[in-house]
Image (tube, rainbow, N blue to C red):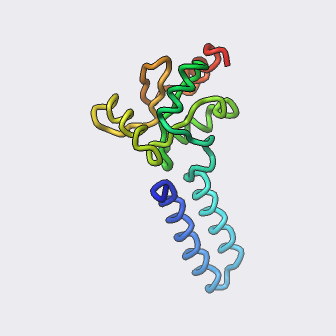
Amino acid sequence: MMRAWMLPMVFLLCGSVVATAFFFQGSPDEAAVFLLGFVLLAGVNSPLIFPRSIGAVEAQRRSAVDGRPVIFWRPGCKYCMRLRIRLGRSAARLHWVDIWRDPAGAAVVREVNNGNETVPTVFVAGRPHVNPDHAWVREQLSSSGS
């Protein structure tokens, strides 16, 4: 759990230091702008913008029932973030597994990626697809009937 929040905490700490320096130099407006920018960076790189993660076993069970894809991701991954943002509202209908929170999920990803934790890895009907295009994922979601 702590690992997922490390990058956002670093952004907040750095933003606080920079904002404090600007504030004491007599530039409170610049301090506020920098602090806001770092808070936004922390938010975007946090697990908060992703739908609630579930365990790999539960995600695979649910996918077998409803046919929706399972996405293995990790906080701070720019490719995961890009996929999440481009999926828009439809992202909430997918099953998301945070590999930093779920060791079984990390093992599944390593198994299909030659020992690497390459994300996003999307499973559709039990077949893995590494870093697929968002349009393709959306198409798979619509073809699952959900």
Considering the image in quadrants, where does the C terminus appear? top right
Q: Residue 38 appears at what percent x and percent y?
A: 59, 63
Residue 52, how many percent across, how many down? 61, 42
Image x and y of residue 88, in percent: 67, 34
* Residue in the foreground of this view, choosing between 56 and 127: 56
Residue at 28% x, 32% y: name it.
114
Pick whichever, 110 or 62, lies toward us.
62
The image quadrant of residue 105 is top left
**Residue at (67%, 64%) from the top-left corner?**
36
Q: Nearer the viewer, residue 113 or 108?
A: 108
Residue 92: x %, y % from top left: 66, 34
Q: Quadrant of residue 85?
A: top right
In this rendering, is residue 32 above or below 24?
Answer: above
Quarter where residue 127 is shown? top left
Relative vertical location of residue 5 with respect to residue 55 in this rendering, above or below = below
Q: Is residue 103 above or below residue 109?
A: below
| Count of picture labels | 0
Residue extending farthest to the left is 114
Q: Residue at x 48, y 44 (%)?
A: 74
Q: Image check: 72 left or right of 62? A: left
Residue positioned 63% across, 57% down in the render = 40
